[in-house]
Amino acid sequence: MTPFLAAADLQELKTYCLDHNFPAFRASQIDSWLHTHCVIDPQNMKNLPNDLKNALQQDFLAPASRITEISTSPDQVEKLLLELHDGECIEMVIIPTEKRLTFCLSTQVGCPVGCRFCASGRNGLTRNLTAGEMLEEFCIGTLRAGRPDNLVFMGIGEGLLNFEQLAITLNRLVDEFTFSPRRITVSTSGYVPGMKKFAAMKREFNLAVSLHAPDDNTRAKLIPAKLRYPVAEILAAADEIAIANNRQYTLEYTLIHGINDSIDHAVKLGKLAFAHHAKINLIPYNETGGEFHRPPLTVIENFENAILDTGARVTRRTERGSSKTAACGQLRASKNTGNNR
């Protein structure tokens, strides 16, 4: 497969210039355009000669992704639908606040986990993203909104099922784009084998575990069996990561009415978080038109207070991007539906 220019490091660029009879200093110029300015189209690298621009365009995918649709919410959150080189689509989200800018990035086209309340996995997994495609997400977002303060790999896909390419992406972001690992969060639905590989990286990335239930019986109502691991195994793997990277992890908990929002659930969750030195992020469910529903505000508040009574740390996610396509995967799903008409 043709390599992605966005995934090239300085040594690879030096080798390319040497092999194609371009002066060595050109590699540093390309590297600066890529990793300082996030410019991934050679035609926009203004100090390169035309023959080098054209050679890069011919020998690399540069760029291979493009924005085909933008959904903007009243609070200026932008969800971008990106078309990839093979016509498949993914989403990324640009989330601005007064204090910081966050990008939410995807790791797969579709998702194999198939959480029953999530739009991302309704049509299963199409394929993994390459590191080049994930880095293009980062660059496209940066060119549009500026360099982010935080990156979260919480978009479409289970990143730890695409571990090899995700690891390349994470290392490139730190080593080439000089992005702090402490400002990068990787989310997982609790894929234990991938979590163990993540721990072995021993870099200070943040971990978010999409737990959604404090016990196995409740979790079985939400997560299909094929990729569901016991809660105890998930937390043991998360603890292993916390020891390896010296970072407190987060338990993501989507509150769904009548499924996982009882006081008993709250107490169990709080006790688990307290025992494992984890923090909890409550996410009131964003309805996608299916069988699941958002709890009433009083239920959400009572759930949060019950957690606080256990001594655990809990925050309620600030709701941004509220719209008909706000939930992860909905913009892509609407695109696919339109294509199938």
Image: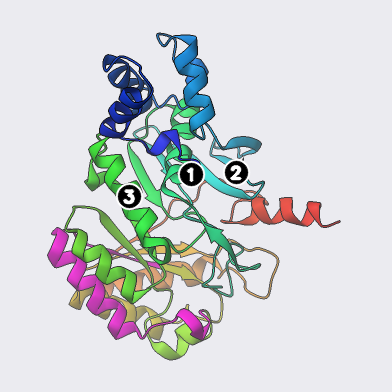
Q: Position of residue 121 (x, y in %)?
A: 59, 67
Visible residue check, residue 101? yes
What residue is pinned by disc 2? 84
Q: Is residue 194 above or below residue 71?
A: below
Badge 3 element? helix
Foreground pick, 118 / 123: 123
The span picked out in magenta is: 223-252
What residue is pinned by disc 1? 133
Foreground pick, 214 / 174: 174
Give the mark nearest the N terminus, 3 or 2.
Answer: 2
Q: Amino acid at mark 3?
A: Ile
Visible residue check, residue 277? no
Q: Residue furthest right?
A: 341
Q: Position of residue 106 (x, y in %)?
A: 48, 52
What residue is pinned by disc 3? 168
Badge 1 element? helix
Q: Residue at x 73, y 55 (%)?
A: 336
Q: CA distance from mark 2 to mark 1?
A: 8 Å
Q: Is residue 231 above or below residue 128?
A: below
Q: Residue at x 40, y 8 (%)?
A: 47
Question: Marks 1 and 2: in contact by CB < 8 Å?
Answer: yes
